[in-house]
Amino acid sequence: MGSRRKTWHEKMADKKDMPKYLILEKRFPCYNAVHKMGASEGDTIVLVNPGEVAEYMKKVPSGRITTITEICKSIARHHNVAGCCSLTTGIFIMTAANAAAEANDAALPWQDIPYWRTLKADGFLNEKYPGGVQSHKALLEKEGFIVVARGKRFCVENYCDFLITDL
């Protein structure tokens, strides 16, 4: 008998061993991104539950946006540590986005996450969101944002003007 694939909703379930506090090491896959946000080797960083990441995403009102970097910084401040694992946070942002889309189809929790208002670092759109970049672009444009091509990628024009930095 084959195993059933978990739904996005099931993947949003909090893990009992989270949040998890670690000492940042250069060997961590998220080291460069976390270091860029201000944490140094030997500092304490946090890995949080997907539900906590989703709560930060919910705080972004219409007409405003945030980035994975800003969510990580807010989580780190909340936990009083030097940084937040951007790799785990990025995975949970994508999970929350897909759970929101799944919830719209089945009246499940998580449907109130305005995931399209959370961008990748430097204002770029997320190709891993439901419907890919084109859907992400359409949702942002529906709210009045101007989305422009930067090579093969898309970003919100002047995204810093709309950025919420303290969630």
Image (cartoon, helix red, strand yellow):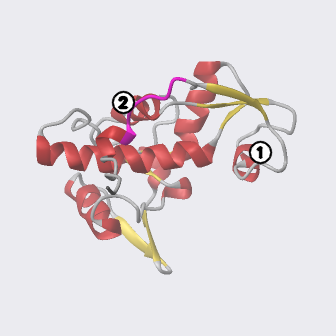
Residue 155 position by quadrant:
bottom left
Residue 98, image x, y percentages: 31, 50
Q: Quick one: label 2, few (<14), some, or many (20+) residues within 10 Å?
A: some
**Residue at 15% over, 45% down:** 104
Amino acid type at mark 2:
Lys
Question: Is residue 12 highlighted in magenta?
Answer: yes
- Would residue 29 be found to the left or right of residue 64 on screen? right
Q: Residue furthest bottom?
A: 151
Q: Secondary structure at mark 2?
A: loop
Nearest to the observer: residue 45 or residue 150: 45
- Would residue 57 be found to the left or right of residue 48 on screen? left
Magenta residues, start to end = 11-16
Residue 66, image x, y percentages: 45, 43
Residue 13, image x, y percentages: 39, 32
Q: Which mark is residue 59?
A: 2
Can residue 115 be seen by looking at this rendering? no
**Residue at 20% over, 56% down:** 142
Q: Which mark is residue 35?
A: 1
Can residue 59 be seen by looking at this rendering? yes
Mark nearer the N terminus (2 vs 1): 1
Question: Is residue 159 highlighted in magenta?
Answer: no
**Residue at 27% over, 40% down:** 62
Q: Secondary structure at mark 1?
A: helix
**Residue at 40% over, 61% down:** 128
- Would residue 100 be found to the left or right of residue 149 on screen? left
Q: Overall secondary structure of the magenta stretch?
A: loop
